[in-house]
């Protein structure tokens, strides 16, 4: 019976009820040592009748061994790994040391973990319990949190317990509070009914409602000085250990240093120190031995055993463990390191080999820790610099940019040779960019390229291409021109493979320094060449997709980025997905496939937050803000646009804030607040936004706002800006928008009719609808109401189909003013009712993919796919996949 935990028990019992009903739920329990986290996990296990239970705990001594905790959790179910999709199965086997490494990044292992848990849950409800999560190795923590955030309809109850310091963003959390006085008194009576009133009052006062303190403090008497509770309990445990016989103390120390509870290893190491298993006989209440495992009665008891042991004895134990762990090289390496008192190349080399194995299994955090400790044991300056550099690379790969930066800066102070110095500069630039310091990243790349230009022009060229990309995102023409000039000055060879990249950089420089129109002729061939870029060349293909957006070829941008997203999802290149999704969503937005754009931007944002790419969120949130504006979701649009501004303030990257400003202007435009539109876009155009491609596309909105406010002189600059670009682009939709702008300023009907002729029947329907609306409004003001109704009705129908509610309302109001009071029926296909995730799943299901294949692409479980399809079918008016396959799911 748990005293005083009724509310906490109800919370976890609710997870169990949900799992039995086929729903999944996650809860992270936080609390101080001794507060009752483990007891609550035991309550969950006791209540999980009829459910399968998987359980693991973080182990302090295994915190640097990749996937140690994940292996512990999944070990009872490893026979079912073969049921997973091939790439996931290979990735998981590689991570757990059961086969060759698989998967291109650590998030494939998280997906494999989710899929395996879902597979187990096919047999009935599943309960996963993780104790001491603050001691999880980073690789296990990443995989478990990745899976936990994606649980939905599998029937899994997932509970983690941790002290403070374990970060689980996006998951429900609950803090265990001290027991109230009544529950504390009852617990004390349960364990020590014979205490005097005076002692009972002292214990109740000093325990602060901590259950472990209530149990342990009565045993200390008055021996302990006042101190924080965990320390007092640990000191009490230390006093208990000090009272043990000498050989028992030594055996307990071996168990504490070994850490994993492997009784065989503990006994073999103890034997080397002259201690036999009989010494455990006096350790009752300190450790328990059962089933080949030795466990401490509480983690603080283990800490006490380490604390009271003198240094020479601890070093001897580490040496003994290193001797008996020759068949477990990674654990042996750490014991060798712990036994070293100064530089030790033997231990450092062992740790370096451990790091190599960890990186092969995607255990980047473990590799970083091993390399950093190896560096501490290294006397040679060159080796020290190399190990610090590799530690920084591993830390960056593990998503720890602050640690990576510190390590890289330490290495940089030791490096004189240009090649490693340039590599370090590239690494530090990558870290700086991911932390939002884009100017710093640019400077590091330029200086690094300068150091290596004469030795390796190809490597220098790659650095300068990255520098140019950074300058472009900052919207800084001077920095971009500098990088471009340096790139042109390199003696690049054909085998360097940088011809198209150099052309793209030059075109971007031309775009920023002389305006986008002049760069279009140089950019257009890059889009045509994109189809010949080989798979895996993510950066080059992403660059081609971006260039396609600059030249207004949105079908090509959509095609390239969709293929890139598909490849990244199938091959597990998760790190590229946020920017690939952002480019895809941008293309779909410009093509007016708004539902698809929202679905893809939401997925890209979710992945960016999952993997820590916060510098990518501004772009994705900007696209979502624009879509919210079109839907008429004022609050959401304002919230997302504000986030874009915050990201710009942090990073200086102007692309997101360009979307944000345009979004707010679009919202005002749909509401008829034309003066606000004009002021906002003029202010944006005066800043770094003017160098972003959005400035070309919102020029038409500036023209419309100026015309509607009766200030045509304020339309001159944006009209010239768009006209120059449209002339270079040679696209029918651009010519149509230009004709509409001229119609608004001149009032000449032939411009409206020319615009409608140029608008394609399906290409960019939003733009056609806006032309129909403005033409209809002009006709109504000319008292040609019958003609106006034809165009206004067409506008209403298109806006409704696209989900552009404020635009549809505005067109419907104009239609009523033109004498048509009949309601225009909204489309009844139900697509507008689909959530972004439902839409993504349905779009993939239409292609014939199975639930398992869809889950692998979207990083969700097959059961979640099935659940969302079940919810989507009624909305779409279908009852089977066969009917779904006949359904057209385009946006126009």
Image (cartoon, rainbow, N blue to C red):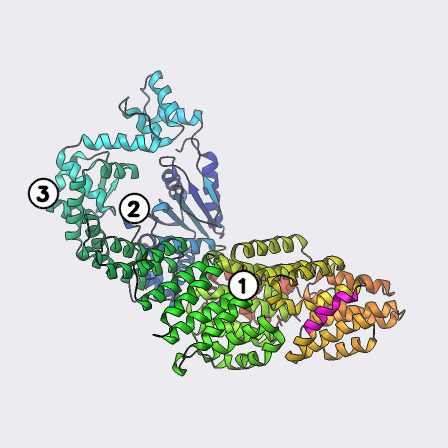
Q: Residues within 10 Å of mark 1 (few under 14, many from 20)?
A: many
Residue 719 sits inside the magenta stretch: yes
Which element type, helix, strand or loop, lies under badge 3?
loop
Residue 344 visible from this viewpoint: yes
Q: Residues within 10 Å of mark 3 (few under 14, many from 20)?
A: few
Q: Which mark is residue 60?
A: 2
Direction right: furthest residue: 783
Q: Which residues are magenta?
A: 711-722
> From the image, which quarter does the C terminus lie in?
bottom right
List x then y, in percent, for residue 806: 73, 60
Which element type, helix, strand or loop, lies under badge 2?
helix
Which residue is under mark 1?
Answer: 474
> From the image, which quarter does the N terminus lie in?
top left
Q: CA distance from mark 3 to mark 1?
A: 67 Å
Which element type, helix, strand or loop, lies under badge 1?
helix
| Residue at position x 23%, y 35% in the image | 286
Is 260 rendered above or below residue 868?
above
| Residue at position x 54%, y 79% in the image | 527
Foreground residue, 123 or 891? 891
Residue 175, located in which quarter of the rendered image? top left
């Amino acid at each position: 019976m748990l005293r005083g935990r009724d509310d906490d028990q109800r919370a976890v019992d609710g997870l169990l009820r949900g799992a039995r009903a086929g729903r999944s739920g996650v809860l992270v329990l936080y609390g101080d040592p001794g507060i009752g986290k483990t007891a609550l996990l035991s309550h969950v296990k006791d209540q999980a009748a009829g459910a399968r239970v998987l359980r693991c705990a973080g182990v302090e001594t295994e915190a640097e061994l990749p996937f140690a905790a994940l292996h512990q959790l999944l070990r009872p179910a490893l026979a079912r790994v073969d049921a997973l999709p091939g790439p996931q199965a290979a990735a998981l086997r590689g991570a757990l040391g059961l086969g060759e490494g698989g998967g291109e990044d650590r998030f494939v292992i998280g997906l494999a973990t989710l899929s395996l848990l879902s597979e187990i849950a096919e047999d009935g409800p599943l309960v996963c319990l993780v104790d001491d999560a603050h001691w999880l190795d980073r690789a296990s923590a990443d995989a478990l949190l990745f899976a936990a955030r994606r649980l939905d309809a599998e029937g899994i109850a997932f509970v983690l317990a941790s002290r403070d310091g374990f970060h689980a963003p996006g998951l429900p959390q609950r803090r265990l509070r001290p027991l109230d006085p009544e529950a504390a008194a009852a617990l004390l009576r349960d364990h020590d009914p014979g205490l005097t009133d005076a002692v009972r009052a002292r214990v109740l006062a000093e325990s602060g409602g901590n259950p472990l303190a209530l149990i342990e403090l009565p045993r200390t008497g008055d021996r302990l000085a006042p101190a924080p509770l965990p320390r007092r309990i640990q000191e009490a445990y230390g006093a208990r250990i000090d009272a043990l016989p000498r050989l028992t103390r030594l055996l307990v120390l071996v168990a504490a240093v070994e850490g994993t509870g492997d009784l065989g290893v503990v006994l073999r190491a103890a034997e080397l120190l002259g201690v036999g298993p009989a010494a455990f006989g006096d350790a009752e209440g300190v450790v328990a031995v059962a089933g080949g495992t030795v466990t401490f009665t509480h983690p603080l008891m283990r800490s006490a055993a380490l604390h009271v042991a003198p240094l020479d004895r601890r070093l001897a134990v580490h040496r003994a463990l290193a001797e008996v762990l020759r068949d477990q090289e990674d654990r042996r390496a750490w014991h060798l390191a712990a036994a070293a008192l100064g530089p030790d190349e033997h231990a450092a080399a062992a740790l370096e080999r451990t790091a190599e194995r960890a990186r092969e299994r995607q255990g980047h955090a473990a590799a970083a820790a091993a390399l950093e400790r190896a560096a501490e044991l290294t006397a040679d300056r060159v080796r020290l610099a190399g190990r610090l550099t590799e530690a920084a690379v591993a830390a960056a790969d593990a998503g720890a940019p602050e640690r990576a930066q510190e390590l890289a800066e330490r290495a940089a102070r030791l490096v004189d040779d240009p090649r490693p110095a340039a590599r370090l500069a590239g690494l530090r630039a990558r870290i700086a960019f991911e932390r939002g310091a884009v100017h710093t990243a640019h400077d590091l790349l330029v200086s690094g390229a300068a150091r290596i230009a004469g030795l390796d022009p190809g490597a220098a060229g790659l650095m300068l291409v990255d520098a140019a990309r950074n300058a472009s995102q900052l919207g800084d023409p001077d920095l971009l021109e500098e990088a471009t000039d340096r790139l042109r000055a390199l003696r690049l060879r054909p085998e360097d493979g940088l011809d198209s990249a150099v052309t793209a950089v030059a075109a971007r420089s031309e775009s920023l320094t002389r305006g986008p129109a002049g760069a279009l002729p140089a950019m257009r061939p890059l889009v045509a060449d994109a189809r010949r870029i080989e798979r895996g060349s993510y950066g080059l293909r992403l660059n081609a997709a971006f260039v396609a957006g600059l030249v207004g070829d949105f079908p090509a941008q959509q095609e390239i980025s969709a293929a890139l997203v598909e490849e990244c999802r199938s091959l597990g290149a998760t790190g590229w997905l946020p920017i690939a999704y952002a480019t895809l969503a941008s293309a779909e937005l410009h093509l007016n496939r708004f539902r698809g754009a929202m679905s893809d931007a939401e997925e890209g944002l979710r992945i960016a937050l999952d993997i820590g790419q916060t510098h990518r969120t501004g772009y994705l949130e900007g696209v979502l803000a624009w879509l919210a504006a079109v839907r008429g979701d004022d609050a959401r649009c304002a919230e997302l646009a504000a986030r874009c501004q915050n990201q710009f303030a942090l990073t200086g990257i102007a692309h997101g804030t360009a979307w944000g400003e345009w979004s707010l202007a679009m919202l005002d435009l749909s509401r008829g607040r034309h003066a606000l539109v004009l002021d906002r876009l003029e202010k944006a155009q005066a800043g770094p936004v003017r160098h972003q491609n959005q400035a070309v596309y919102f020029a038409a909105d500036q023209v419309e706002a100026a015309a509607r406010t009766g200030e045509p002189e304020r339309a001159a600059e944006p009209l010239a800006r768009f006209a120059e670009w449209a002339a270079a682009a040679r696209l029918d939709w651009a010519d149509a928008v230009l004709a509409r702008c001229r119609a608004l300023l001149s009032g000449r009907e032939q411009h409206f009719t020319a615009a409608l002729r140029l608008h394609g029947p399906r290409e960019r329907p939003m733009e056609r609808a806006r032309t129909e609306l403005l033409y209809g409004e002009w006709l109504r003001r000319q008292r040609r109401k019958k003609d106006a109704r034809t165009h206004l009705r067409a506008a209403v129908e298109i806006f409704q189909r696209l989900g552009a509610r404020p635009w549809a309302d505005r067109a419907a109001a104009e239609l009523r003013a033109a004498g048509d009071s009949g309601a225009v029926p909204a489309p009844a296909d139900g697509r507008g009712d689909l959530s972004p995730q439902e839409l993504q799943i349905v779009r993939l299901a239409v292609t014939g993919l199975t639930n398992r294949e869809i889950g692998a692409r979207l990083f969700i479980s097959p059961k979640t796919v099935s659940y969302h399809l079940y919810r989507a079918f009624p909305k779409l008016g279908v009852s089977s996949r066969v009917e779904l396959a006949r359904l057209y799911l385009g946006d126009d």
